[in-house]
Amino acid sequence: MNQEATAPAANFIRSMIEKDVAAGKHEGLVATRFPPEPNGYLHIGHAKSICLNFGVAAEFGGWTNLRFDDTNPDKESEEYMEAIKRDVSWLGFEWKSLCNASDYFDQLYDYAVLLVKKGAAYVDSLSAEEIREYRGSLTKPGVDSPYRTRSVEENLDLLERMKNGEFAEGEHILRAKIDMASSNINMRDPAIYRIKKSSHHRTGNQWNIYPLYDYTHCLSDAIEGITHSLCTLEFEDHRPLYNWVLKQIDPASKPEQTEFGPLNLEYCILSKRRLVQLAEGGFVDGWDDPRMPTIAGMRRRGFTPASIRDFCSRIGVTKNEALIEWSVLENSVREDLNRNAERRLAVLDPLKITITTLPENHRELVNLPNHPNREELGTRELAITREMYIERADFEQEPPPKFKRLVPGGEVRLRSAYVIRCDEVVLDDDGKVTELRCSHDPDTLGRKPEGRKVKGVIHWVSAADSVAAEVRVYDHLFNRPDPMAEENFLDALNPSSLQLYSNARVEHHVASAPAESRFQFERVGYFVVDMNLSSAERPVLNQVVALRESKTA
């Protein structure tokens, strides 16, 4: 993919970087990073950060690293790392280097020793509860720990013994020595190393202490030569600490942190902790459930990389938080699929029709374009046969006003085929319509009937040439735009978020399509061949998005 083509539109970050480059700052280099913690799958909010970091660096001829912030071994795994790499690549981006915070554990520890020697860090032996009490509040300054005055020698000894595993978790902690009276609570002697007797998925049992994020992140940026550290607004109050650590260590590279507004999307939860609840609590079918806002879920739903990049470009980059309407995302994918998805016929809720004026073995081929506006996509053949299927909703025994589809004694055109008339309605013992017996006008294949006007046009599939399929139509996972407004977000779950059509029929060309093939089912919506469940014998298709005129979300 040409990453320059997806560079972010004009925004305050782009303008800032443009000025930096023009001034020769960082020697004109633009180097960014995308640094997720591998404790879950990426979601659409991460896609915004990915597009920004990779896009702006590529625009200015720079590069981007993918770095795993793997400093919390209790919650991280290789599964999540592989999923993150897969998602970033699928979105169309290439990283310069694949990095891990754990790559720098030795160097980070040496920096911690340096801080202790400078008198800028100390080992605290207060309990976690005592540390919270000593820290104070937004209206009350903190109080110095009684261990804050430990000598450099004692601190070095304790830190070494922490590293060697001589103490239990929570017995000691290494803190930066800054200002317990600071108005910014993040600057009140924050922890930079804690004891954790957990095996790391990369370093095994080598380490008994692990660095914390605020300490690790800025130094990892510096080690990698990152020039612009772009992150969401939640880290704005952490920027003074980011700068303090860099000032104390004084690395050769001096990255700068800039914050932007995070993405909030209607009807979605973008909290990784709560997404874990959904994925592991049985509320959805795993991380890649098509109702999930994860990139894996959206991929399985049928969203395209181009549509997600387009969405991120449309919403822009600002300094403020905003709740984006779901329709903005739908419009991006709908426009992409309208341009690129081949057309097919499918009947979700089939009603059998028998064209009694055709012989038993009738098989008449019609040629249909794969796309109405793209001749290069070619054509396909479909068979008109005596027995067909139409949508049950396209017939009404007692039609409402202005109903323009099939009714008893009425006519309708089968799309790209004949005009038919409903002559007889077959009912079962419960009064349900089971079959329509129809006649056809043999002079109307590709032509209007003479002497009368037929208003309705409906789609169909041949009973003999179609394939049984399972079709899944999705609504929002939550039934309110802001699920977090509920006391318990799970109370906002939509019990009707998935509608299964287990007896659908699709034209046989769909059955042979590979996974992730996307189609417009004419008059129905856009659908994708499910990448996990579909087979040629039993296709499974997920609705990506409805047609514009559809009321189904």
Image: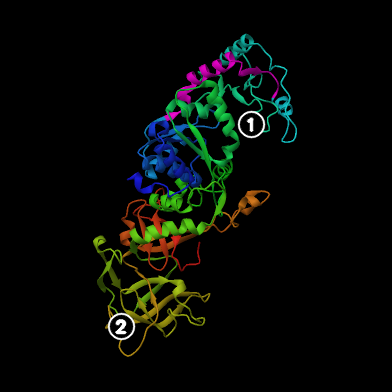
Q: Are circles 2 and 1 on residues that touch, CB within 8 Å?
A: no
Q: Say above or below: 451 vs 93.
A: below
Read off the magenta span: 99-127
For the N terminus, the quadrant is top left
Residue 62 located left or right of residue 291: left
Q: Position of residue 16 (x, y in %)?
A: 46, 41
Spot occupied by residue 513 in the image (x, y as percentages of width and height): 32, 55
Between residues 2 and 118, which one lies in front from this camera angle? 118
Q: Residues within 10 Å of mark 2 (few under 14, many from 20)?
A: some
Q: Position of residue 42 (x, y in %)?
A: 48, 42
Q: Secondary structure at mark 1?
A: helix
Residue at 38%, 57% in the rendered image: 336
In the picture of the structure, the residue carrying the numbered disc 2 is 448
Q: Which residue is mark 1?
A: 186
Whether residue 531 can be seen here: yes
Q: Which residue is the extreme one toward the front?
A: 23
Helix, strand or loop for disc 2: loop
On the image, the x and y values in percent for residue 211 come to 55, 24
Horizontal arrangement in the rendering, residue 69 relative to residue 422 (left or right): right
Examine the structure image and report whether residue 107 is included in the region drawn in magenta: yes
Q: Which badge, 2 or 1, is on the more N-terminal residue?
A: 1
